[in-house]
């Protein structure tokens, strides 16, 4: 685990562990069964460095909010919030409500109060149930919020509608509560943190655990034989499904810590240039970070798909779920606002940069059907962003000039379709 030196006295990690235990007798619904599940709540880490960046909420969030026509209905029960914190939490809720479709309202218990030093807070599903009609293998469970959409019924917890997501955040952490994404470099953006944690509550998490957090020898995946729907889509580079390994086993631990896990959800892949999105599997298992996130290096700060990575930088604001995450949610059974996500043909082979090698200017030709607004970053071999410009397309093409100033070297050019939330990175050489 990276230990942030930033704000040492306030180690902004989530350190508490939620265990959800439900009795089978609580179930009043006929076609779902509650399952006892142990899972590790997200530990969302700030990086040791600040990174000022702002991924705006999709334009439809503002349109739908103005029209009162969101696709999703969330009922939030706020406890202990300040007005600023509640407004920021609600904004994150509104972003999700403009991103996913609900037929049954998602009930959220939102709590705000002093937590231990260094604890940001977190959120997760209020429980997991089987959905025999889902089409997934019978040993698959679903978070309540998703199970309600799949079965089109309010799932009851005893005689009451279930709390689908439980969220608790620190009132003493150094959060920025603005909605504008202009997060100071020394603060963590509350909207982004809530948006991230609600993503876990909606089902963006798997059941990977280890037998001993200090010196693990075996990895565990199942709970009483059950896996989350997330786990059904994880495979290694071979590819071999994560569910194909003996559980528990040392082999499973090797998979969790092999830096070689991917999501094979077809819609997630389609949003990722037909490349399997990489999930976070560092060589040392980090409880609450490993496995249940996208890979940090693949989707670094400022990336359009960086919301569900395990780290957030102070100063970083991510107000969009990103199309890779939404694609995976569609793979897991969610309906996405605006209809099925389009398969995009924006990938490393479909765009051309010429000349390459270049001297003072390059021309980027894009496939048909792309948006008009692009952000272009030139990144050196050390991962530093040397140049970042915003461009609009003309005839499916973007011209970049004044590149004489760059040293002769190998660079990466990251080409981001800002409207669609997708990017492609290509190598190029400066003569
Ligand atoms: Zn997380």
Image: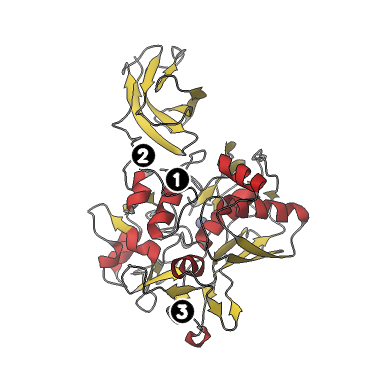
Whether residues under marks 2 and 3 lie with C-beta atoms below 8 angstroms apart, the answer is no
Give whichever of discs 2 and 3 has the lower sequence position. Answer: 3
Image location of residue 228, percent across then percent down = 40, 67
The answer to whether one can see residue 49 in this image is: no
- Residue 317: give x, y in percent of width and height: 59, 42
CB of mark 1 within 8 Å of CB of mark 3?
no
In the drawing, what numbered circle is on residue 344?
2
What kind of element bears circle 3? Answer: loop
**Mark 1–mark 2 CB contact (< 8 Å):** yes
Q: Quadrant of the C terminus?
A: top left
Give the spatial CA distance, label 2 vs label 3.
39 Å
Give me the C-alpha separation between circle 1 and circle 2.
10 Å
Residue at 77% x, 55% y: name it: 83
The residue wearing badge 3 is 36
238 is higher (above) or lower (below) than 29: above
What residue sits 38% from the left and 17% below the top? 363
Mark 1, other Cα within 10 Å: few <14 / some 14–19 / many ≥20 = many
**In this image, 48 relative to 420: left or right?**
right
Q: Which-is-in-front pick, marks 1 and 2?
A: 2
Outermost residue, left direction? 238
Give the secondary structure at mark 2.
loop
Q: Crowding near pointer 3: few (<14 within 10 Å), some, many (20+)?
A: some
Gap between marks 1 and 3 measured at Cα: 31 Å
Q: Which residue is mark 1?
A: 323
* Above or below for 423 versus 118: above
């Amino acid at each position: 685990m990276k230990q942030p030196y930033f704000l040492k006295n306030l180690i902004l990690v989530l350190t508490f562990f939620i265990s959800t235990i439900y009795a089978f007798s609580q179930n009043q619904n006929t076609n779902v069964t509650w399952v006892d599940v142990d899972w590790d709540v997200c530990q969302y880490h700030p990086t040791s460095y600040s990174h000022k960046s702002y991924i705006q909420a999709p334009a439809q969030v503002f349109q739908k909010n103005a029209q009162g026509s969101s696709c999703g209905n969330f009922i939030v029960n706020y406890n202990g919030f300040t007005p600023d914190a509640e407004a920021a939490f609600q904004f994150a809720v509104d972003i999700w409500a403009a991103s996913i479709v609900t037929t049954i309202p998602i009930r959220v218990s939102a709590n705000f109060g002093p937590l231990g030093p260094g604890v940001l807070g977190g959120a997760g599903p209020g429980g997991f149930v089987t959905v025999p009609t889902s089409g997934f293998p019978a040993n698959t469970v679903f978070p309540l919020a998703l199970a309600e959409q799949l079965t089109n019924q309010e799932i009851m917890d005893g005689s009451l509608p279930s709390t689908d997501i439980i969220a608790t955040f620190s009132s003493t952490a150094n959060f920025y509560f603005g909605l504008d994404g202009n997060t100071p470099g020394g603060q963590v953006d509350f909207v982004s943190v809530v948006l991230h944690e609600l993503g876990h509550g909606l089902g963006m998490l798997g059941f990977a655990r280890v037998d001993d957090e200090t010196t693990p020898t075996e990895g565990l995946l199942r709970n009483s034989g059950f896996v989350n729907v997330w786990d059904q889509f994880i495979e290694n580079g071979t590819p071999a499904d994560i569910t194909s390994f003996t559980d528990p086993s040392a082999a499973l631990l090797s998979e969790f810590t092999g830096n070689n896990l991917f999501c094979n959800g077809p819609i997630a892949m389609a949003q990722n240039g037909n490349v399997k999105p990489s999930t976070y599997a560092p060589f040392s298992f980090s409880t609450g970070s490993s496995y249940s996130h996208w890979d940090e290096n693949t989707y670094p700060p400022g990336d359009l798909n960086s919301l569900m990575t395990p780290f957030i930088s102070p100063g970083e604001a991510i107000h969009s779920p990103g199309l890779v995450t939404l694609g995976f949610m569609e793979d897991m059974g969610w309906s996405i606002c605006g209809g099925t996500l389009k398969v995009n043909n924006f990938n490393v082979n479909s765009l051309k940069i010429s000349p390459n090698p270049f001297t003072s200017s390059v021309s980027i030709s894009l496939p048909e059907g792309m948006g008009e607004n692009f952000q272009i970053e030139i990144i050196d071999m050390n991962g530093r962003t040397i140049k970042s410009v915003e461009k609009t397309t003309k005839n499916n093409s973007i011209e970049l000039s004044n590149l004489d100033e760059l040293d002769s070297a190998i660079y990466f050019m990251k080409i981001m379709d800002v409207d669609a939330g997708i990017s492609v990175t290509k190598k190029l050489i400066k003569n």
